Image (cartoon, helix red, strand yellow):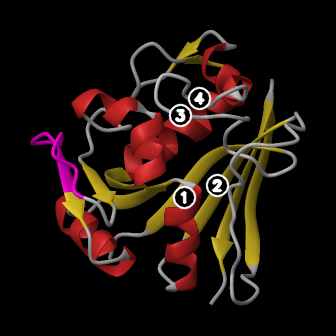
Amino acid sequence: MSKVISAHAVSVDGYITGREPGAGRGLGDGTMLFDWYFNGDTPSQVFDGFRLSAPSARIFDAFARRVGAVVAGRNTYEDSEHFGGGSPHPAAPLILLSHRPAPELTERQTLVTTGIEDAVATAREAAGAKDVGLMGGGVVTEALKAGLVDEVVLHQVPVLLGGGRPFFQSLPEHVRLRLIEAVPAPGVTHLHYAVER
């Protein structure tokens, strides 16, 4: 069975955006969270235009190749200007989890309004044998609450943003993680965890 994974760039103090993110402002003042996409000379084999350091390219592409569909929340969708009608992944369709209508959806995007379980089930069907990627703090938190997440990857950038949208939101209980791999790279440390059940 495919896995449900979350891979996010995050500051050391736990933010996935800077202050005042939004449509036309992207990550607000947190754009340095993605500088490592372009700080090397190894082209990504999955994402055109990304030139990463060799260790980052190995980690990034390994996870990108696994993803067959992406579930994103409404804030991420709006902040990213609807992903230009596509998806945050060049080959994977987007499943948008939202309680509000989204009339601007395209054929690469599917709206699910009935909760995280249904969004993940829709994404699993779309992904086939590949994994489901989660995008956005609210989506990841809801999926953790529902016991749906198998792996968490933190691309931890050495900066304290001091504000923005936090990655992890309030959880009803502890979620134990087991470190699988830690890979230091220029401008980022890749931390790969399994969620223990």
Q: Quadrant of the C terminus?
A: bottom right
State the residue at coordinates (78%, 33%). 188
| Residue that carries the numbered disc 3 in the rendered image | 22
Residues under labels 1 and 3: Cα distance?
21 Å
**Residue 122's spot in the image, x, y percent?**
22, 69
Viewer-proximal residue, 9 or 162? 162
Residue type indicated by callout 4: Ala
Q: Nearer the viewer, mark 4 or mark 1?
A: 1
State the residue at coordinates (59%, 29%). 57
Marks 4 & 1, CB-CB < 8 Å contact: no
Could you tell me which secondary element the residue under label 2 belongs to?
strand
**Residue 96's spot in the image, x, y percent?**
30, 55
Q: Nearer the viewer, mark 4 or mark 3?
A: 3
- Badge 4, how many Cα within 10 Å: few under 14, some, many 20+? many
Looking at the image, is 18 positioned above or below residue 131? above
Marks 3 & 2, CB-CB < 8 Å contact: no
Q: Earlier in the sequence, mark 2 or mark 1?
A: 1
Numbered range of the magenta stretch? 101-110
Residue type indicated by callout 1: Ser
Find residue 35 and report its image quarter. top right
User: Which disc, if any, is residue 6?
Assistant: 1
Marks 2 & 1, CB-CB < 8 Å contact: yes
Could you tell me which secondary element the residue under label 1 belongs to?
strand
| Residue that carries the numbered disc 4 in the rendered image | 57
Q: Nearer the viewer, mark 1 or mark 3?
A: 3
- Badge 2, how many Cα within 10 Å: few under 14, some, many 20+? many
Whether residue 151 appears in this view of the structure is yes
